[in-house]
């Protein structure tokens, strides 16, 4: 029997909440991996357009996702005090803010072509990417609202339901991609547009399933998330906005680092951009594990903070960081030992460009192995700081690390110094390392020690 309050108990509690969230993250990532694999089999131009299009879309998405991320610690602290009204208020207003943001973001994706050309992309690639985004962009609405419900369910420690919704969506998306990209089951072969249509349908279905999980079970009905949904709660909306906007801007700073890297890869060439997209999908697999543990850390830190339990807060944080670090070491070993096997999963064996893709991708994966630990550190620190509702200083630290250090370093290494695609990825290493050190240091300085007074 594991004693409550021990390090081992904290490990078990973090895994109990984190494993379903990791599974849900991986299932969600499977949506993108399925698109990448099947579009890679379809054609390199289609893969390059989807990579560029998703990078453009993702910048908008992660900014809007900040409001859902704010819901998680707020509901966790409310739940630790048994305040059902507060949990409902902040979740409902998180959904409101997601709706409003999607209404602003979708037109930007619709007219993405001229923006991409202004950023230096080739006109043919920009036109193909805009065609993709004019369909895929409509996933913004269900995807953002889904994130709010995921935050609510995770904070209520109902993460298994998030996992089931995500798994159903992953299976459905794979089937729709196979049918609509290549024209199977009697459906037309729509290629890149088929992948976009599959994504819109899948995201909408996952949202509806999650909404059912959040409202229909007996123990969830008392929260009445969608009862009188149209009624505003301006005080709660302001709270979610104030906490969520810095979170969104922090994510935008990091997402901007990766999107800027995609743009620079586009300047280098279509082959480099395609290799970059495949490598990012592989690295994203490990990142999703850290993200699941980070979300678990946010919930547990928020609940401990709500109880004003400094010992539980610090011990739980140590457990979460330890788990993330162990997995980071394992992922480094896999990447270093099996780079070509991992890349080969995403490339058509008959593609004449396969040798070149493997060559570029292998070099990028070797660089990616360098930032596994620091990337884990920064995402875990962000999750823990959000549990303390500390979002403004991390936003500034992220902007400095990614935009003032990481992106310029990548540009200088790639172009003036002539390292090309590898130089872009070394810029990622530098930016993520600086962020990891700054944010982890801040959390351990802010986390109260047992026996010290804490603000109510």
Image (spheres, rainbow, N blue to C red):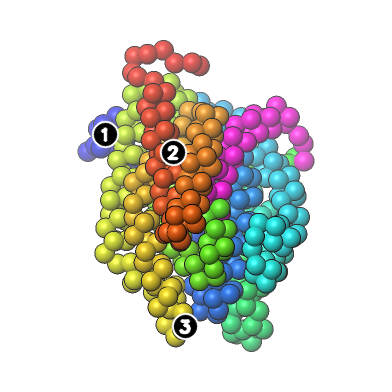
Q: Disc 1, disc 3: CB below 8 Å?
A: no
Element class at badge 3: loop
Q: Where residue 192 sits in the image (x, y, percent)?
A: 63, 74
365 left or right of 209?
A: left
Q: Where residue 330 sits in the image (x, y, percent)?
A: 28, 54
Q: Disc 3, disc 2: CB below 8 Å?
A: no
User: Which tag, 1 or 3, sits closer to the chain's start?
Assistant: 1
Q: Which residue is mark 2?
A: 435
Residue at image coords 33%, 24%: 311
421 left or right of 58?
A: left
Whole-angstrom CA distance, mark 1 to mark 3, is 51 Å
Q: Which residue is mark 1?
A: 7
Q: Callout 2: few (<14), some (14-19), or many (20+) C-alpha neighbours within 10 Å?
A: many
The span shown in magenta is 230-259
Q: Which residue is mark 3?
A: 351
The quadrant of the picture occupied by the N terminus is: top left
Q: Where residue 174 sits in the image (x, y, percent)?
A: 53, 72
Mark 1 or 2: the one toward you: 2
Whole-angstrom CA distance, mark 3 to mark 2, is 38 Å
Mark 1 or 3: the one toward you: 3
Whole-angstrom CA distance, mark 1 to mark 2, is 27 Å
Residue at image coords 64%, 60%: 120
Residue at image coords 34%, 55%: 369
Q: Where residue 297 sits in the image (x, y, percent)?
A: 41, 38
Tell me the tag on residue 45: none
User: Which tag, 3 or 2, sits closer to the chain's start?
Assistant: 3
């Amino acid at each position: 029997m594991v004693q409550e309050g021990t390090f081992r108990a904290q490990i078990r509690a973090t895994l109990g909440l984190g494993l379903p969230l990791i599974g849900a993250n991986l299932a969600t990532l499977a949506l993108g991996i399925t698109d990448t694999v099947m579009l890679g089999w379809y054609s390199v131009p289609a893969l390059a357009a989807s990579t560029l299009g998703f990078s453009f879309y993702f910048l908008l998405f992660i900014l809007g996702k900040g409001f859902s991320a704010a819901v998680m610690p707020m509901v966790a602290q409310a739940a630790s005090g048994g305040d059902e009204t507060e949990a409902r208020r902040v979740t409902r207003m998180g959904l409101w803010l997601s709706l409003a943001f999607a209404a602003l973001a979708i037109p930007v994706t619709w007219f993405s072509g001229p923006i991409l050309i202004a950023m230096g992309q080739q006109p043919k690639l920009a036109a193909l990417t805009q065609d993709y985004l004019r369909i895929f962009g409509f996933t913004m609405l269900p995807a953002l609202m889904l994130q709010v419900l995921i935050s609510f369910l995770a904070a209520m420690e109902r993460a298994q339901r998030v996992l089931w919704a995500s798994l159903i969506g992953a299976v459905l998306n794979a089937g729709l991609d196979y049918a609509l990209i290549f024209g199977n089951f009697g459906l037309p072969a729509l290629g890149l547009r088929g992948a976009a249509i599959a994504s819109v349908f899948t995201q909408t279905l996952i949202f509806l399933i999650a909404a059912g999980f959040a409202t229909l079970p007996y123990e969830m009905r008392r929260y009445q998330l969608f009862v009188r949904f149209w009624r505003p709660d301006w005080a709660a909306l302001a709270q979610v906005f104030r906490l969520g906007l810095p979170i969104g801007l922090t994510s935008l700073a990091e997402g901007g680092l990766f999107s800027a890297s995609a743009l620079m890869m586009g300047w280098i060439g279509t082959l480099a951009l395609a290799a970059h997209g495949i490598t990012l999908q592989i690295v994203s697999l490990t990142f999703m594990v850290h993200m699941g543990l980070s979300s678990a850390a946010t919930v547990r830190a928020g609940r401990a903070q709500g109880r004003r339990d400094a010992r539980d807060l610090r011990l739980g944080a140590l457990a979460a960081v330890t788990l993330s670090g162990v997995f980071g070491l394992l992922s480094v070993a896999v990447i270093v030992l099996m780079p070509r096997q991992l890349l080969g999963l995403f490339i058509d064996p008959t593609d004449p460009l396969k040798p070149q893709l493997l060559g570029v991708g292998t070099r990028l994966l070797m660089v990616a192995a360098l930032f596994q630990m620091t990337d884990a550190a920064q995402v875990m620190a962000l999750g823990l700081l959000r549990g303390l509702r500390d979002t403004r200083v991390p936003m500034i630290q992220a902007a400095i690390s990614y935009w003032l250090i990481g992106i310029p370093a990548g540009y200088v290494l790639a172009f003036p110094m002539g390292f090309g695609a590898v130089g872009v990825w070394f810029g990622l290493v530098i930016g993520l390392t600086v962020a990891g050190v700054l944010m982890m240091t801040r959390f351990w300085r802010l986390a109260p020690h047992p026996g010290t007074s804490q603000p109510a």
